[in-house]
Image: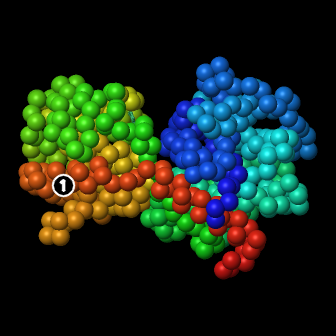
Amino acid sequence: MDKPLKILLVSSEAVPFAKVGGLADVAGSLPKALRRLGHDARLALPKYRQIHGAKFGLTKVLGSLLVPVGSDHELASIFGSVVEGMPIYLVSSNKYFSREEVYGYDDDGERFVFFCRAALEMLKALDWQPDVIHCNDWHAGIIPNWLETIYKDDPFFADTATVFTIHNLSYQGIFGPKLLEFADLADYGLIPHPKDGELSRVVVLMARGILFADVVNAVSEKYAQEILTPEYGERLDPILALRQDRLFGILNGLDYEVWNPATDREIAVNYDAASLDRRVENKLALQREAGLPLDPDILLVGMISRLADQKGFDILAEAIDSLLELDLQFVLLGTGEERYHRTFAKVAGKYQGQAAVFLKFDGALARLIYAGSDAFLMPSRFEPCGLGQLIAMRYGSVPIVRSIGGLADTVQSFDPTAGQGNGFAFSDYSEEALVAAVKRTLETYRRKDTWRTLMERGMRADFSWEVSARKYVELYHKALELKQVGRWQAGN
Ligand code: ADP
């Protein structure tokens, strides 16, 4: 177990290079945490137009890499650098990546298949042989598939295991069958879905990652179980069931240097668990910023989120009038679906002086909300891991969550008799359950000593990458072990 491993993490996004969602936070932090544990972790991602060479000290390490596409080849070049101690490889192609956005193009299938093929060919050209290729979400799902097909007899990858991580099962990378030709997999054909005729006629890159990787994991233990059910399986639960004996859950970590109320430059006053009395200055600053009455005693509920169905905005929209009948203030920061923009813009108008709504992306305001709110609301329909509740706890804002996925793994509902718990949780996906949880929060908030205990518990908990990176190392060893066993023998 102590042998340092060589790991290539393959991701379509990573902080600080390109970020669309939580995947970027994981891909930016995990390899660094692995390196701190003594492993040689490196990162591969596409070189999007927004990534500036000079800023990251990029140099060309491979000028014209021949990348097989279908029966032909296209050229890629590879740029490299060492950023904050971590070696990175960026796959460059004018044709596929020199564009404004990271995703959303008709040829996204070809773009990410090309990226993955270039990453594998790059390893051979550089003669850097990883023990594990860690593939993330659908964009890298083709790699485990290739290692079991066209690269199966390639001695270069004979000892390389694959890990496939599901960050969000609802984005699956579904494309027409022509993509198989591009991926050089036409000879192997489509893969029938055990139950779904429609999915049997298309290429589902997420499913291929799940089916062919040596081990599969999701970003929390609870989510790993939930996705085996039809309710949360997004039509892939029968595929996941085939790999159930190799499906694990590892909670994402939080970068404790990036998220630290003792050093955060964006908040009004720095504080830690030992100086919690200072925190109220942030609440007053937030109330000022939000145009709410300055009141240190009223319960201030914050929320920062994509305005999407996943995040529970339909039940929140139903609950909002009942919630704002309670003695509390509400601040929402988020962007997303237009209909929720309209709904919550109206809420702000109707409840002026009690509710403030910021329909934008604003990192600095987000930090002030984490530092200045008393409670942090996440009523998600599903939540693979969730970062918001972890940041909130780190900043002393007590989470109110639906007990689901990563939220269930990190927030235990306060039990007044036993005195245990670190937040407030509800189970039913309903307006009533949400309102009831906020009422319980309000009752507890009035008992100052109990509330302070809850704040301190959240602040003292350890959700750092250190813990999660160690679990990934165990998972990599498991992948290497199971690679020897073979793909289907381990219990099937
Ligand atoms: P997801 O990745 O599904 O959107 P997470 O809870 O895992 O949800 O992560 C969301 C992250 O994005 C958190 O760090 C949150 O603070 C941040 N965030 C979301 N919306 C905004 C916004 N409008 N402004 C600033 N930060 C935001």
Q: Is 138 on the left-hand or right-hand side of 421?
A: right
- Residue closest to the eye, 227 or 128: 128
Q: Residue at x 48, y 50 (%)?
A: 465
Rendered residue at 60%/59% (across/down): 473
Query: Is residue 337 placed above or below 470 in the rendered structure?
Result: above
Residue pointed to by mark 1? 453
Callout 1: CB less than 8 Å from ligand 1: no
Label count reads 1
The picture places residue 32, in percent across and down from the top left corner, at 57, 43
Q: Is residue 383 left or right of residue 182?
A: left
Q: Residue at x 25, y 27 (%)?
A: 268
Do we see residue 219 in this rendering? no
Q: Residue 258 appears in which quarter of the rendering?
A: top left
Answer yes or no: is residue 134 visible: yes
Q: Nearer the viewer, residue 308 or 44?
A: 44
Q: How is the image coloured?
A: rainbow
**Which image quarter is the C terminus in?**
bottom right
Quarter of the image containing the N terminus?
bottom right
Q: Residues within 10 Å of mark 1 (few under 14, many from 20)?
A: some
Question: Residue 57: x, y in percent?
Answer: 66, 24
Q: Amino acid at mark 1?
A: Thr
Question: Hey, which quadrant is residue 12 in on the image?
Answer: top right
